[in-house]
Image (cartoon, coloured by chain):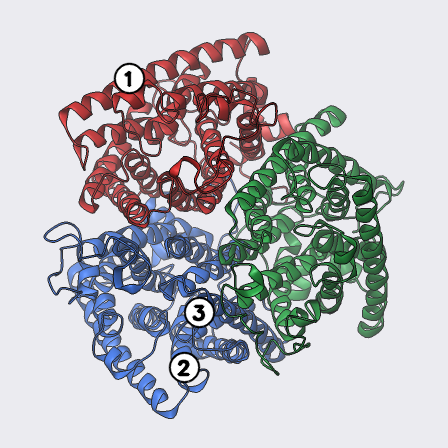
Chain colours: A red, B blue, C green
Amino acid sequence: MMICTALVFFMHLGFSFLEIGLTRQKNTVNILFKNFFVITIGLLLYAIGGFNLMYPGFEDGSLGIFKFAGFGIAAPEGGMDFGYADGGYTWWTDFLFQGMFAATAATIVSGAVAERIKLSSFMLFAILYVGLVYPIVGSWKWGGGFLDQWGFYDFAGSTLVHSVGGWAALIVIYFLGARIGKFDENGKPQALLGHNIPLASAGVLILWLGWFGFNGGSVLSADPTLTSLTLVTTCLAAAAGGIAAALFSNILYKNYDLTMFMNGVLGGLVGITAGADQMGPMDAIFIGVIAGVVIVLGIALIDRLKLDDPVGAVAVHLICGIWGTLAVGIFGELASFKQLMIQLAGIGIIGAFSVVSAVGLILAVKAITGGSLRVSKEEELKGLDLTEHGMDAYADFRLNQH
Amino acid sequence: MMICTALVFFMHLGFSFLEIGLTRQKNTVNILFKNFFVITIGLLLYAIGGFNLMYPGFEDGSLGIFKFAGFGIAAPEGGMDFGYADGGYTWWTDFLFQGMFAATAATIVSGAVAERIKLSSFMLFAILYVGLVYPIVGSWKWGGGFLDQWGFYDFAGSTLVHSVGGWAALIVIYFLGARIGKFDENGKPQALLGHNIPLASAGVLILWLGWFGFNGGSVLSADPTLTSLTLVTTCLAAAAGGIAAALFSNILYKNYDLTMFMNGVLGGLVGITAGADQMGPMDAIFIGVIAGVVIVLGIALIDRLKLDDPVGAVAVHLICGIWGTLAVGIFGELASFKQLMIQLAGIGIIGAFSVVSAVGLILAVKAITGGSLRVSKEEELKGLDLTEHGMDAYADFRLNQH
Amino acid sequence: MMICTALVFFMHLGFSFLEIGLTRQKNTVNILFKNFFVITIGLLLYAIGGFNLMYPGFEDGSLGIFKFAGFGIAAPEGGMDFGYADGGYTWWTDFLFQGMFAATAATIVSGAVAERIKLSSFMLFAILYVGLVYPIVGSWKWGGGFLDQWGFYDFAGSTLVHSVGGWAALIVIYFLGARIGKFDENGKPQALLGHNIPLASAGVLILWLGWFGFNGGSVLSADPTLTSLTLVTTCLAAAAGGIAAALFSNILYKNYDLTMFMNGVLGGLVGITAGADQMGPMDAIFIGVIAGVVIVLGIALIDRLKLDDPVGAVAVHLICGIWGTLAVGIFGELASFKQLMIQLAGIGIIGAFSVVSAVGLILAVKAITGGSLRVSKEEELKGLDLTEHGMDAYADFRLNQH
């Protein structure tokens, strides 16, 4: 579990590399700053309140918000040893593992809004979303709330982590508008090329590594059978997603598209996340293949909707998150019509809550920061690194202007 | 074991970084695409057939090819718990660990053939080599086949993984020919400089990290004594290999050559792999030192033979793989003349089979894809990123033409 | 423990990325060469002598210097199994874990002296400092020496690793002088911009990951309560350090400074290292916040003193190392006036010894290498990559001259 926590932490490097690699060099420092902010503030918020908000009742009913950090009773009975929650891990590990998850939700948003959001707007939104929305939704299922009692199944967070982040990403990019130049005067989408493909692809491999911890750790014990099965389904879905997306985009666009390959891998990973412990190898491959196809179509759909998502976060995390959650009702041990309906209900309820919350928060942020969520046109063209940070990510290199 | 699997997976990032770092920017996307292809297709092929091809008899004799993936009996008796194979790991873990190894063999080829092979040719060759040759060779030793019965010793694959990949690399670069500009009109080798040394050296450190899993995991249990000894010998051989290569190349060429240092580390790692659990610390240092010297000479030899291996894959994986396999008969617990002869026999048989298979496959690939294995002269000069992928790895940077 | 060792090893990639990212492209290969040298020679020296120098008495009193590597008795009674030192790990693991620590001390120096030290001078200094000073100091506490008997507490090396490296860094940069252009004719410090911020920030995240191993492994057992608590305090201190440094520098300089954010994270990590197992979550946050403020002031102080530390190593490792060691007497389980005095005494004694040793060694190195520690003015302007290594880190990119 502790190792899994380390791997989930390391996913933040993966997200950072992916996001900066797929965007332009002039916004690199800004994206990195946002990522550092999300990890650090996410952990602190989770320590101060989120952990207790998400697991409100706790074993003896005596833990409330703000208690983890030492205001009040520090830990539940037995929380300090392996006996805790029958899971073979300690309360501290649980906190850290869940805290790393919490930060992930905000990181998903960070990628989608890159290259045009005001830093202060983003920071405020991230604080509110990670501090409130994520733990409230989490409490409905992982905190033993009503969705858990209905039988909604989401093993490691296709919906609770990825969709929750994905919905927020969708809402914020809708309010934010597209980057200058993303759509030409006829509304045709243009490619704003990523500036560092090696780092982007490293990001994907680091994320895949992190998923060993994300899904492996979600077994919440060292049960070797289940954990190893989970890793096998995770890796096969990733592989199948990548190959399917590469093949399908090759058929559609007659091109060996590395970005699609990478997004297919991520789509497969998000897709398997909801049911990684319930699937056999062939189930995992099917889920991955469908995720790979869905990714290619999803990215085209976002463009069609005139939305601008520089890193494909909505297609990867929201659309494949929904697909993965549904897949629990279609493939594997739990497959049944009734389960599928429960999954649909969970997706709908969490989606509605996430959308409403995100809209509310974005309007609140707009009101608080006074006016625009995005930087001025001049700042956007010049790049946020210089205008928000007075810094150049690659000072010694000559750069192309665009 | 599961953590080791994660580390072995992570080696693919190491290989990617090493390969792109030591080649030119115009072929970066192409190399990354090949690496993504190798990992994903490697896992899928191993799931569909390779695993059962490699471990054919299995415990109850009932498992055949195609059965892992769910066509037939899913798992051996007891395979699902720690009791499996007396090794303290599960059948699923075993599959994933071995599947990651399988993909490694193809990755070794990927580096050597970089910057001029047609993507389609490479993909076809990789499928056939990983899907067939690697598991057949593996079955002779790790599947309990005749080499195992002879007493051939190859702890974690100096021969079974590295040489098998290295032989293929040698054969393919022979058929492929050198990159344009590698040898001048007098046949003198020219340096075609790598474009990103930081990523190359990161690749080496990531590979070293991966070797903790590669060798550590090959103990195939959590026996603390043997595993920790293995990590000590692995690290000391890597350190000794690096220092020896740096020193020896400094004596020969009066230069502090970072690339030689890095290749020396890799050579030491490959060299210790066959006997990492049989050596003491001083043995490991000796093996590493010799590997470091061998690397420097090996790279010069490849040049002398007018072969073009952009990343030094043949010297590192084939030559040091042979050295490491021999070293089992010279140093450590198993050292004896008889063992040395057995090691030689194993090297010879596997080498002959790998060479013959690689030649056969390369001719088959030539026939299937119709004609040339390599891209046209124009495409090579322009770079494969633009011609095969329509993409630029570093869109925002100004580049030197060459 | 073995996994922690792997993570501590991986910190060397973090240091490499951080150092090259924060310096200029023309010295990249040189820095990487130094890092490879430090890891490899560090391990070899520790095998040949350091390990036995640091743990001299050992269990049966029969182990002396040079014995680990096979000259004499190879291992203590029971050292080969989990019973060793009641710690649940083996003698081999212990060696490797400690060996990785030893190399860290020299790496800290490597960053501070970057861009102007002669490679040969650095290599000689590193050999002597890692081979002698580090293990002698270590023996006083971790080898059961007099500081240990006084009750000096340094859990994972705020003083024994970070300050020992930091003092050496301070002394060497004093003797070495500033880089050309660092201070203008009026003595005003100038920014010599780092050339690759993505790699620098990746370095910080990799170091943070490594700290999971550094502090987690220093529990020296798999005690789940203590280990998980340690990881929680480590992460919270890092998060608090980062946020505090970003906020404080924003107040002082009206800028969102990513470099300060990153150094704040590192400062928090160094600060918690001495007492990571003695603190509660709120203690860790306080320690981190103070470390974050200290970092910002420390970096300004170094500039004020006309010292040139390109990566902020002195502020991070020395100043925050001192702070963390003091914090053990102020926060957490051990807090008392008496403990604070003992901590002060330890800091003073180790500081004095480190300073005296570093001065002695630097004079010895000067005498041996004949004259100047630094490269010539021409070489410095041209960059060490070309002049010491005949190599370019980014051959295909057009570069800005400065």
Crowding at mark 2 (Cα within 10 Å: few <14, some 14-19, many 20+): many
Q: Amino acid at mark 1?
A: Gly
Q: Chain of mark 1?
A: A
Instruction: Classify mark 2: helix, strand or loop.
Output: helix
Percent coordinates x, y for residue B42 in the rendering: 27, 55
Q: Chain of mark 2?
A: B
Crowding at mark 3 (Cα within 10 Å: few <14, some 14-19, many 20+): many
In the figure, A332 relative to A302: above or below? below
Numbered circle sitting on residue B328:
2
What is the distance, in whole Å, between disc 1 and disc 2 at their CAs?
62 Å
Instruction: Classify mark 1: helix, strand or loop.
Output: helix
Is residue C355 in view from this perspective?
yes
Q: Pointer 1 and pointer 2: residues touching (CB < 8 Å)?
A: no
Q: Amino acid at mark 2?
A: Val
Label 3 belongs to which residue?
B226
Residue at 44% from the left image edge and 79% from the top image edge: B301
Percent coordinates x, y for residue C122 in the rendering: 73, 64
Residue C394, quarter of the rendered image: bottom right
Residue at 33% from the left image edge and 89% from the top image edge: B341
Label 1 belongs to which residue?
A348
Instruction: Depth check: give the residue in front, C85 or B74.
Output: C85
Horizontal side, residue C111 vs residue A144: left or right: right
Is residue B190 in view from this perspective?
no
In the figure, C231 relative to C116: above or below? above
Percent coordinates x, y for residue A223 in the rendering: 33, 47
What is the distance, in whole Å, between disc 3 and disc 1 at their CAs?
52 Å
Q: Pointer 2 and pointer 3: residues touching (CB < 8 Å)?
A: no
Percent coordinates x, y for residue B198 in the rendering: 55, 54
Horizontal side, residue B34 vs residue B249: left or right: left
Numbered circle sitting on residue A200:
none
Instruction: Classify mark 3: helix, strand or loop.
Output: helix
